[in-house]
Amino acid sequence: MNNRIRGLLTKKLSHAAVVASIGRSARAVIMEFVRQHGRAVLGALAVGTLCMGTAVLAAITPESVFKTAASNQVASTTLSIEKPSSVSTGKLMIATIAIHGGSAATISAVPSGWTQIGRTDNDANISLVTYWKVAGASEPSTYDWAVDGQTTAEGGITVYSGVDTSSPIDTYSGNTGLDVTATTSPITTTANSEELVTAFAVDEGKTTVAGSYFATSTGMTKKFDVSNTPFGPSLSVQEAVQVSAGATSSKSSAISGNSNPKNWVTQIIALRPPPPQVVANGGYDGGYNSSGSFSANPNGGTACFVGWGGYRAASTSLSWGGNAMTEAVRTTGFTDVPGNQIWHADIWYIKNPPSGTSTVSYTNSGGYDSNKDAAEFGWLCTTGEASSPIGAVDNSSNNNNVTTHFDLSITTTQPNSLILGTMFNNEIISNMTATGTLASYLCT
């Protein structure tokens, strides 16, 4: 997608702003850092929503505790599943229910707060129904589903943390068949590091193979394998992380019991990780110094970014807590003498910064006048990025004679994009006829 970023210069605000409106839940966080010494050096650092790019996000964590339950075969079936002991406020619960009888069985009552993900029927043989709920401050000890008709059911609840609680389900798909192997349909995830939850169910429940009906699918971890004996159904839930967004392969599980084909049903669900949060930010006036330092605390952030704007100076190195930062993008332009570029706007970053308060050190190279290396800094840290936080960069903006605004644009590769930008303006703030504006921006 193409995203346009517009920075506005106004006497009232006396600052430059870089804002973005993108993704599912666009937001902007503005940091300002301003200095006036005859000319003004301005910078702004803004963040929209996350562009996953090639980043590997902090993984969704499947809890080790789960609960399963079986129903009795009565005129009206109630399936009661205990709340797993690890459930706490903000964690995601996934309920998976297999029903003997397929499309003929009707779920007549669902516990409060549960939202259906999907229902997949293998004719009148067996059905698989899934639900989700984000745990609140007070949860009951059991959750009851009522199924009309004389049938049996088997179900389980699994728990996950680190999920986007506002929109936890990215996508899902169901599949049915008659075979000795149950197979999910392929799906396409839209974000990196999504948790794949697969459910396999069969309309059998022989005592001799109860608890081991389904083989573990390649690359997955089996959560549970349970049976309602002696007639079924049997149900297994398995999990894996899809590191990169895109198409998933089908997941297959061999069904035990005997070599006869069996009626089976499957679902595969992709859980969406949360968008990153800006957890710390600040600014620093470097003044007319060729080197210096300031303090910053990432506050649990997994990636930190420093925006730099300079007049007659160029940033040559930045370090965070003694660890070298990487320059992501640089814009240079305009000359006051032949061959001398006097305005710069950069973005530097570090992955997995040290915890706690650190010293951020910088060095600048002098330009036309080495005694006037004016530099301004703005920084922020976010949760979310871990492996490769830079998705796209652009440093094409080199706007002269800006009077009211500047327009930037960048193409993001995925929804939910984090947009960062630095802007440098070389005019006194009270004089709104800017003679030059530079900007650097990137999508991570």
Image: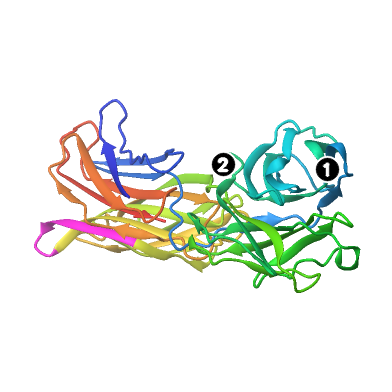
Lateral position of residue 257 relative to residue 36, left or right: right
The magenta-colored residue range is 329-339
SS majority, magenta? strand
Q: Secondary structure at mark 1?
A: loop
Lateral position of residue 254 relative to residue 337, left or right: right
Residue in the foreground of this view, choosing between 292 and 417: 417
Lateral position of residue 327 relative to residue 234, left or right: left
Give percent across and percent down for residue 214: 75, 67
Residue underneath mark 2: 167
Give percent across and percent down for residue 256: 78, 70
Quadrant where the image shows the C terminus: bottom left
Please name the amino acid that badge 1 sits on. Answer: Lys
Question: Is disc 2 surrounded by few (<14), some (14 to 19) or many (20+) residues within 10 Å?
Answer: few
- Asked if residue 246 is positioned above or below residue 380 in the image, the reply reads below
Which disc number belongs to residue 250? none
Residue 288 visible within the image: no
Tell me the colour scheme of the image. Answer: rainbow
In which image quadrant can residue 216 be found?
A: bottom right
Which disc number belongs to residue 83? 1
Residue 330 inside the magenta-drawn segment = yes
Question: Is disc 1 surrounded by few (<14), some (14 to 19) or many (20+) residues within 10 Å?
Answer: many
Q: Residue at x 69, y 39 (%)?
A: 133
Residue in the foreground of this view, choosing between 434 and 364: 434
Give percent across and percent down for residue 218: 65, 73
Give percent across and percent down for residue 121: 65, 48
Counting residues from the start of the chain, the first of labels 2 and 1 encountered is 1
Question: Which residue in the rendered view is the most extreme toward the left?
Answer: 338
